Amino acid sequence: MAEAAVAITGAADHFARIVGSAHVITDPAECRVYSNDIFFWDDAHVADIVVQPGTTAEVSDIVKTAARLGLNIYTRGGGMSYTNGYVPAVAGAVLIDMRRLNQIFEINPTDRYVVVGAGCTWEKVAEALKPHGLKLVFLAPFSGIYSTVGGPLSQNVPASMKGILGIEVVRADGAVVRTGAWGRKTSHGGAVPFFRDYGPDLTGMFLGDTGAFGIKTAAVMHLYARPEGAAHASFAFETYEDMAAIMIDLGNHDYLYRRVGLDPFKSQNSGKVGFKEALKTLGDVSTSGTSVLSGLKDTVKMAAQGTTNFMDGVKWSMHLSTEALDSAGAEAGMERVRKICLKRGREIANVLPRAMEARGFSVRGFLGGQGQRWIPTNSLWPLSRAVEVATAVRGFFNARRADMQKHGMWESYMTNWGQGYFQCEPSFYWVDEVSELHLRHLGKDEADKFRALPPNLPARAYAKKLRHELRDFFFDLGAVHVQLAKFYRFDESLSAETWRLLGDVKGMLDPDGRLNPGNLRL
């Protein structure tokens, strides 16, 4: 044990010479916090050292030093993962915390791109673009107040990766690579990263790799001008199947830039947890005189204050936003959508999509209203299978209802669709001990309150079992997934030749298998 401590101290000294001693963590308790995500993993290890680089050159030197010391490398962004993405699967690991790589290097309105560090939060990017009247071509994750750019690029976000024009990657040998037009040699003051498809799509090779192929240190993202017109609408449905059928009908309405479907639990609790902060922000805007909400000011104000539930009586709900050159165009687009939605549902107050527009980022939903633990399981399907999947997944939970009730557990769903896919992401809640990772992202009052929740080992064991059963259920039905990391059965799902090609790429880029070992189940 003493020899191990000496070895860690010696390694820490090497890393301190690269990033400074203030950015090297060896305290076991703190390393444990950094080595956890928001679920429980029986086979998890704790990183020996956490290192916090501030530049790409420092990342490169850390990688070279780790290889020399025989240490494996795991890469952490905002810590919002729930598929074992950065949790060490092997002993002898250094965890690179990327959050100091949070620079916004360039905003180019003419060539329509932004260059940012991989540790930059999505909220920071959005705020930097606002004065320029620009926005990203895709919606950032709802956890973007903490979630970093590098995380979703490594884990994938449905239909969003087309907006990535290039990335900067540190390879397993420490070499720094840039992709697309960004990788071009030039004598004109630096390559302009305006074009992704310059030769083979090397950018795409590193997207969704969960860090197994390289460490992303910066990214170039495509921009477009923020339209002047926007329209919002919400609809209620009696069944999941009704809502899924409407999603199929709306499949070719690509001007819908926000599409969120909620189950009865989330619909009824949207103003209490998850979207509470967004409603508060909308309430502040609506009462400041800077926004006219078409007669919804009183509803918004009361919802933000918790004095009314604007979703009373709503079971399944869908929340939509359109945009166009002007308000008339956006409203005209929404009117087409409205006619389709009213075939199976009814229109309700459009408070929630307006709230999401006012404040698009929050992590409060990663716990229940009373601090219950929460864990989602993602699945993606051809849009044509939406109704079939809705029925199947409800059957899955109904068949386990007695055991779930025994453990005080209930399910919820987040649903959306776009460009030919249907996303069904069930989650479930149960009362259990709240981790330090969760507590650090809560306000003091809630953190103090939830810190006292005791461990619930029987319910936790059942949550692990239930999640694996749901994963396997999706596998047998033919699902694909984002956020693969180590959880989903990605290796088993691919044909033998496709899996061999993936292994060949890993072997070429990381021959010693030191980058995020276990991710993609490689």
Image (spheres, rainbow, N blue to C red):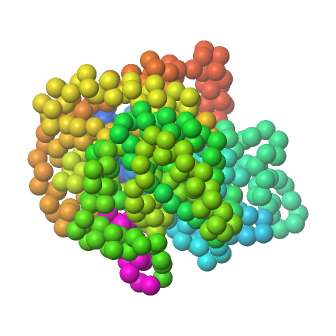
Q: Residue at x 14, y 60 (%)?
A: 449
Query: Quarter-wise, where is residue 419 in the image?
Result: top right
Q: Residue furthest bottom?
A: 289
Q: Position of residue 246 (x, y in %)?
A: 50, 39
> Where residue 350 sits: x, y (%)?
43, 60
Relative image position of residue 347 (x, y in whole percent): 43, 53
Q: Residue at x 62, y 56 (%)?
A: 333
Q: Is residue 144 visible?
A: no
Question: What type of secondary structure mainly makes up the magenta span?
Answer: helix
Q: How many marks?
A: 0
457 relative to 364, above or below: above
> From what the image shows, is residue 202 above or below residue 293?
above
The picture quadrant where one finds residue 507 is top right
Of residues 325 and 209, the one nearer the viewer is 325
The residue sitting at 27% across, 31% down in the picture is 464
Give the residues in magenta.
Answer: 276-289
